[in-house]
Image (cartoon, helix red, strand yellow):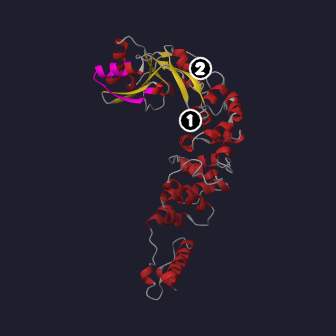
Amino acid sequence: MKVQGDWIDRPGTQALFAALKAGGHTALFVGGCVRNALMGAAITDIDIATDALPEMVSNIAENAGFRTIPTGIAHGTVTVLARGVSHEVTTFRRDVKTDGRRAVVAFSQDVREDAARRDFTMNALYARADGTILDPLGGLPDLLARHVRFVGEAEARIREDYLRILRFFRFYAVYGNADDGIDADGLAACAANADGIDGLSRERIGAEMRKLLAAPDPAPAVSAMEQSGILARILPGSDAKALSVLVHLEDRLTPRWQRRLAVLGGVDPSDALRLSRSETVSNNAVRDAIGSSLAPAALGWKVGQVDATDVVLCRAALLGSDLPQNWQAEIARGVASEIPVTASDLMPALHGPALGKKLHEIEARWLASDLHLHKSDLLA
């Protein structure tokens, strides 16, 4: 079996492979580019595994006229920019010691050792420069079946890096076959090692959750997280039951992880997932507005088109109701509207706190009217 595509035939990529081969070294495509090519998915990164040590990779690449960046020399990775294309070139490795967050590695000359330290069997696939597949661990059947399975013993892989618990659910959401269900051994291992999540940084957890919730349909994976107790550990008080309804209601709309996060509810996720200031403001606005009685137009004026869209969808998902008629057009009407009364209309009769109180009252009445009250009505 071979992988094919423009990404593999790029002159810079083939020139880099040729340079490593001329230096007496093995070079193989590995990981995401091989996996995605076999699945027909987009390829964004090109990773290369080699038996050449990092210093040798740098020397060979620079002698070939390419630029190198010592991205992670200690872990064997050199970024090579070859004719406008970036390649992450990493020496074959094996783990010497791990603490659940980071690993001490030793370089290897054996591709099987390199494959054995990877997380999932579908990520332990390699390809030669011509696209011919190498499958050291027999992961190809898993990939073709879209079965996300840990390499070797699931608990051992998880204890090497507890972030793999979240990666397991994320990969199931993105690449797994929901009809066949999640891998039972992997799920049991995740549940048994859930305490390890507490040692992970919030930034790493947040990055994984963003990717998981951005999947086309994360509902089966999040449901499995809930059943295994992982979701409650990350987002206490959250509830996954409305997520599948939300995904259905989104229809052709672009998926937004922020929207999916809001419908889960629970405690404020800003610290747990290290949300940015703007993400926190948006999340709080959506969560607060879900429980309000504001109609779509009023929401459009109050929180803007993006957040108003999320509110309407989340509200319908949580209530199990239909979407309001013409809700998108109504949101647009609200976004384009301007409140007909301003502070100057109330001055100088009112000023200071009294002015602010009156403006707040007028705004509430205008919003409650679905933006239909005119200036004369609001000033009466």
Question: Left or right: 39 with respect to 225?
Answer: left
Name the outermost residue toward the bottom: 349
When the figure is inspected, residue 177 is found, relative to residue 216, above or below; the finding is above
Q: Which mark is residue 141?
A: 2
* Residue underneath mark 1: 174
- Mark 1–mark 2 CB contact (< 8 Å): no
For the record, the magenta segment spans 56-73
**Looking at the image, can residue 193 be seen?**
yes
Residue drawn where x is 42% and y is 82% of the image: 344
Q: Nearer the viewer, residue 352 or 251?
A: 352
* Label 1 Cα crowd, 10 Å radius (few <14 / some 14-19 / many 20+): many
- What's the amino acid at mark 1? Val
Distance from disc 1 to disc 2, alpha carbons, whole Å, reads 17 Å
Residue 102 location, x and y as percent?
Answer: 55, 31
Q: Secondary structure at mark 1?
A: helix
Dot 1 or dot 2: first in sequence order is 2
Q: Residue furthest top?
A: 24
Tell me which residue sits at (56%, 76%) in the image.
Answer: 365
Residue 58 in the magenta stretch? The answer is yes
* Vertical side of 212 occupied by 2: above or below: above
Horizontal arrangement in the rendering, residue 278 relative to residue 201 (left or right): left
Q: Position of residue 276 (x, y in %)?
A: 50, 52
Q: How many marks?
A: 2
* Nearer to us in this view, 259 or 297: 259
Q: Is residue 149 visible?
A: no
The amino acid sitting under disc 2 is Pro
In the image, residue 299 lies at what x, y percent?
53, 64
